[in-house]
Amino acid sequence: MRIVFMGTPAFSVPTLMEIVGQGHDVVACYSQPPRPSGRGMDLKKSPVHEAAETLGIPVVTPESLKDPQEQQRFEELEPDVAVVVAYGLLLPKSVLETPKEGCLNLHASLLPRWRGAAPINRAVMAGDTETGIQVMRMEEGLDTGPVCMSETVAIGPDMTAGELHDRLSVLGGDLMVRALAAVSRGGLAERAQSADGVTYAAKLSKDETRIDWTLAAGDIHNHIRGLSPFPGAWCTLDVGGKSERLKVLRSHVVEDRTGPPGEVVSLDDGPVIACGTQAIRLVQVQRAGKKPMSGSEFLHGVNLSTGDHLS
């Protein structure tokens, strides 16, 4: 089949590699344009852009697909199917209707739960115990189309969003090539999404990354792992009379310690911080400009005492 692949981040790359590995004819890759990155703010190509060039696939990077000329360029590719994996741009109706077999989207949740931009982070932050990866046929609505194939994945109590991301990314590639095989046989089944249980995974904002120590320890733990490793949950502490931001990447709930929210109540095997109820141990942290380190290693570099406060 003639396939147009549309994706941008690293999450999308395993699916592209699986499709090419199965011998499909990927006639073009659509990805978001290179963006300024790093200290020098040099333009950087997306992971999908770089992977496609390595594979010798033509890359198209429009700012938008609303332009009629861009829609015509897409139509001239004469795709049998478009595969969309975290592309990041809306597909107009004309684009959705161009491929003979439609547009198939790989979505990282069990729809209709967590429609939208950040389903992996939101599932972990909410304390969900399972999620999944699904192939759905795209419609004009936001992740409203019928589901074609699905795989369910358990979310462990200490699993981070980064770990779940990597797991779903690999599963997604396998699931999509199975869906394409079914399309080629004319046997891709579909089921409409339920009208019940709809939730939306809003894009993460900087305003919600700061840790609120007045919350329950379990909620803070989910908040930390749902934002790990990026963008990262953070708090501040006093180091040598200066306020320093501390990113917390891993934590553990400590049930038998209490105190005023934000207070350091123990330094055993890493700082233990009191929450609204119970406490959490900082298992892995990252100081500004430093590499991630264990909670114990962190204590070697700062003068932190019980009774101190994080904010």
Image: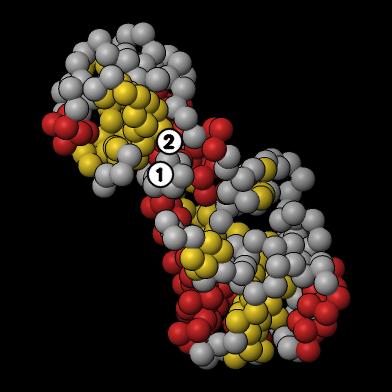
In this picture, is 66 found above or below 298? below
The structure residue drawn at horizontal position 54% and vertical position 38%, both measured from the top left corner, is 206
In this orientation, does residue 224 appear?
yes
Rendered location of residue 307, percent (x, y): 25, 10
CA neighbours of label 2 inside 10 A, class few (<14), some (14 to 19), many (20+): many
Horizontal side of 247 relative to 130 (left or right) equals: left
Among numbered discs 2 and 1, the one appearing first in the sequence: 1
Rendered location of residue 308, percent (x, y): 27, 13
| Residue under pointer 1 | 228
Rendered location of residue 35, percent (x, y): 56, 64
The structure residue drawn at horizontal position 54% and vertical position 33%, both measured from the top left corner, is 208
Q: Amino acid type of disc 1?
A: Ser
Which quadrant is the C terminus positioned in? top left
Horizontal side of 208 relative to 255 (left or right) equals: right
In this picture, is 279 found above or below 153? above
CA neighbours of label 1 inside 10 A, class few (<14), some (14 to 19), many (20+): many
Q: Amino acid type of disc 2?
A: Ala
Dot 2: what SS? strand
Residue sitting nearer the eye, 254 or 33? 33
Q: Distance between the residues labelled 2 and 1?
A: 7 Å
The structure residue drawn at horizontal position 81% and vertical position 61%, both measured from the top left corner, is 140
Residue sitting nearer the eye, 216 or 176? 216
Q: How many labels does the image show?
A: 2
| Residue under pointer 2 | 233
Q: Dividing the picture into quarters, in which one does residue 65 lie?
A: bottom right
Cβ–Cβ below 8 Å for labels 2 and 1? yes
Dot 1: what SS? loop
